Protein backbone atom coordinates (compact mmCIF):
# COMPACT_ATOMS: atom_id res chain seq x y z
CA UNK A 1 0.00 0.00 0.00
CA UNK A 2 2.42 2.62 -1.20
CA UNK A 3 -0.20 5.34 -1.09
CA UNK A 4 -0.04 5.20 2.72
CA UNK A 5 3.61 6.23 2.48
CA UNK A 6 2.65 9.31 0.51
CA UNK A 7 0.47 10.50 3.37
CA UNK A 8 3.01 9.57 6.05
CA UNK A 9 5.81 11.45 4.29
CA UNK A 10 3.61 14.48 3.72
CA UNK A 11 2.59 14.64 7.37
CA UNK A 12 6.17 14.04 8.56
CA UNK A 13 7.27 17.02 6.46
CA UNK A 14 4.46 19.26 7.78
CA UNK A 15 2.90 19.66 4.34
CA UNK A 16 -0.75 19.88 3.38
CA UNK A 17 -2.36 18.09 0.46
CA UNK A 18 -2.82 21.51 -1.13
CA UNK A 19 0.92 22.26 -0.84
CA UNK A 20 1.93 18.99 -2.44
CA UNK A 21 -0.71 19.29 -5.14
CA UNK A 22 0.60 22.75 -6.02
CA UNK A 23 4.17 21.41 -6.08
CA UNK A 24 3.10 18.66 -8.49
CA UNK A 25 0.92 20.97 -10.57
CA UNK A 26 -2.35 19.15 -9.97
CA UNK A 27 -5.57 19.79 -8.09
CA UNK A 28 -5.77 18.93 -4.39
CA UNK A 29 -8.58 16.46 -5.03
CA UNK A 30 -6.44 14.59 -7.55
CA UNK A 31 -3.58 14.39 -5.07
CA UNK A 32 -5.98 13.24 -2.34
CA UNK A 33 -6.93 10.32 -4.57
CA UNK A 34 -3.25 9.38 -4.97
CA UNK A 35 -2.93 9.24 -1.18
CA UNK A 36 -6.09 7.19 -0.81
CA UNK A 37 -5.04 4.75 -3.54
CA UNK A 38 -8.06 5.37 -5.73
CA UNK A 39 -6.01 6.83 -8.56
CA UNK A 40 -2.68 5.76 -10.07
CA UNK A 41 0.10 8.27 -9.54
CA UNK A 42 2.09 9.14 -12.69
CA UNK A 43 5.78 8.23 -12.81
CA UNK A 44 6.84 11.87 -13.24
CA UNK A 45 5.03 12.70 -9.97
CA UNK A 46 6.82 9.82 -8.23
CA UNK A 47 10.14 11.22 -9.43
CA UNK A 48 9.27 14.70 -8.12
CA UNK A 49 8.08 13.35 -4.78
CA UNK A 50 11.11 11.11 -4.30
CA UNK A 51 13.36 14.12 -4.87
CA UNK A 52 11.25 16.37 -2.62
CA UNK A 53 11.25 13.87 0.26
CA UNK A 54 14.77 12.56 -0.48
CA UNK A 55 13.63 8.95 -0.64
CA UNK A 56 13.85 6.32 -3.35
CA UNK A 57 10.97 5.61 -5.68
CA UNK A 58 11.28 2.00 -4.53
CA UNK A 59 10.43 3.21 -1.03
CA UNK A 60 7.48 5.28 -2.28
CA UNK A 61 5.93 2.33 -4.10
CA UNK A 62 6.60 -0.19 -1.32
CA UNK A 63 9.33 -2.30 -2.92
CA UNK A 64 11.70 -1.60 -0.03
CA UNK A 65 11.54 -0.22 3.47
CA UNK A 66 14.88 1.55 2.94
CA UNK A 67 14.19 5.27 2.53
CA UNK A 68 17.64 6.27 1.33
CA UNK A 69 17.70 6.98 -2.41
CA UNK A 70 20.25 5.37 -4.67
CA UNK A 71 23.35 7.44 -5.46
CA UNK A 72 22.95 9.63 -8.54
CA UNK A 73 24.62 8.46 -11.73
CA UNK A 74 26.95 11.09 -13.14
Image: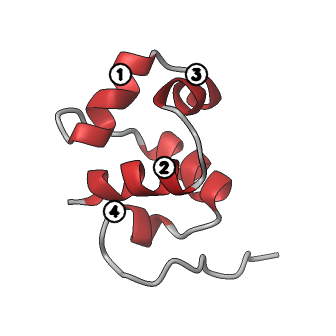
Give 23 or 17, whichever is nearer the viewer. Answer: 17
Nearer-N-terminus badge (1/4):
1
Nearer-N-terminus badge (3/4):
3
On residue 61, the disc is 4
Report how many numbered discs are placed on residues in the image: 4
Name the element at disc 1.
helix
Badge 2 is on which residue? 11
Residue 72, picture quadrant: bottom right
Q: Between marks 3 and 2, how big is the CA–CA gap?
A: 19 Å
Name the element at disc 4.
loop
x, y percent for residue 37: 20, 42
Q: Between marks 1 and 3, how big is the CA–CA gap?
A: 10 Å
Q: Residues within 10 Å of mark 3 (few under 14, many from 20)?
A: few
- Asked if marks 3 and 2 touch (Cβ < 8 Å), the reply is no
Q: Quadrant of the C terminus?
A: bottom right
Q: Between marks 2 and 4, how big is the CA–CA gap?
A: 17 Å
Badge 3 is on which residue? 25
Residue drawn 41% across the image and 62% down it: 60
Q: Nearer the viewer, mark 2 or mark 1?
A: 2
Name the element at disc 3.
loop
Q: Residues within 10 Å of mark 2 (few under 14, many from 20)?
A: few
Rendering colour mode: secondary structure
Residue drawn 35% across the image and 81% down it: 64
- Asked if marks 1 and 3 touch (Cβ < 8 Å), the reply is no
- Asked if marks 3 and 4 touch (Cβ < 8 Å), the reply is no
- Asked if marks 2 and 4 touch (Cβ < 8 Å), the reply is no
Badge 1 is on which residue? 30
Amino acid sequence: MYFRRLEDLRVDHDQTQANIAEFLGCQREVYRRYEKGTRQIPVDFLIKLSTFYNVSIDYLVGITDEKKPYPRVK
